[in-house]
Amino acid sequence: MRKKNDEEEAIKSKQKLQVENLNEKDRKIVRDVFWMVVSVLEQPTYDMRGLFVTGMPRLEFCLFAFEKLLYIKEKALGEHLTALKDEIQVPIYPTCRLYATQWFMTFFARDFPLELSLHVWDIFLLEGWPIVFKIALALMQRSARHIRNLDFETSLQYLQHDLPRKIDVNEIMSMARSIEVSDHDLGMIELEFENRPKDEERKRRR
């Protein structure tokens, strides 16, 4: 434990020294980035802190909401994936937990082109969470025809690893702009999420 603490202190000292050696312009950038991170973690508009605290309540909501929106916007696809999952008796709920967790945790920074994540962050900082769901839904719309011909395991492989390398960022952004998801929509789903039967939810996730 003491060795770990010493290592952490050494890292902090090194980081502090690096900041102190910056010129004034770069120091301002570091300060701005720091307070932006604080803002997105704590402000209700963003509430990203819930992605990282124990239980990950924000992630749980995102997955719950995305599954609901998928059934609204692409019902046939949502039902298809859930039917495939149930067929092989995978006891996970919602189904999107198996492929979309990293989308919401990283804002599409993992495996997808960096340009997509940068677009998402730009709009997220201006408008909040709707853009994240719009992009996720656009990816599913882009994949729908292909996924319907795959088994469940191959579908997960495609969504997690193949799709990120195949997308056209401009196409996905254009598709996302045409999808309607508002703060009001998410607010209504959040009420449903908060009032869902907790015991039933835990049972479905086992």
Image (cartoon, rainbow, N blue to C red):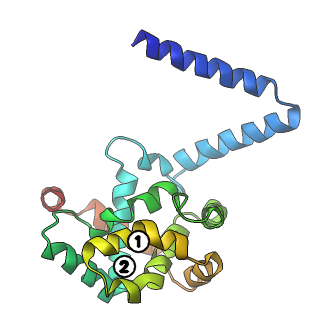
How many residues crowd around disc 2 within 10 Å: few (fewer than 14), some, or many (20 or more)?
many
Residue 115 in view: yes
Q: Is residue 26 above or below residue 141?
A: above
Residue at x-position 61% and y-position 82%:
171
Badge 1 is on which residue? 159
Q: Which amino acid, mark 2?
A: Leu
In the image as oriented, which residue stretches furthest toward the top? Answer: 2
Q: Does the CB distance between marks 1 and 2 fall below 8 Å?
A: no
Tell me which corner region of the image, top left, top right, bottom left or bottom right, holds residue 122.
bottom right
Please indicate whether residue 186 sits to the left or right of residue 119 in the image.
Answer: left
Q: Position of residue 181 (x, y in %)?
A: 49, 77
Residue at x-position 31% and y-position 45%:
55
Q: Is residue 87 above or below residue 112?
A: below
Q: Is residue 159 above or below residue 25?
A: below
Q: Which amino acid, mark 1?
A: Leu
SS label for mark 2: helix
Q: CA distance from mark 1 to mark 2?
A: 14 Å
SS label for mark 1: helix
Badge 2 is on which residue? 70
Q: Position of residue 193 (x, y in %)?
A: 30, 64
How many residues crowd around disc 1 within 10 Å: few (fewer than 14), some, or many (20 or more)?
some
Q: Earlier in the sequence, mark 1 or mark 2?
A: 2
In which quadrant of the rendered image does the N terminus lie? top left
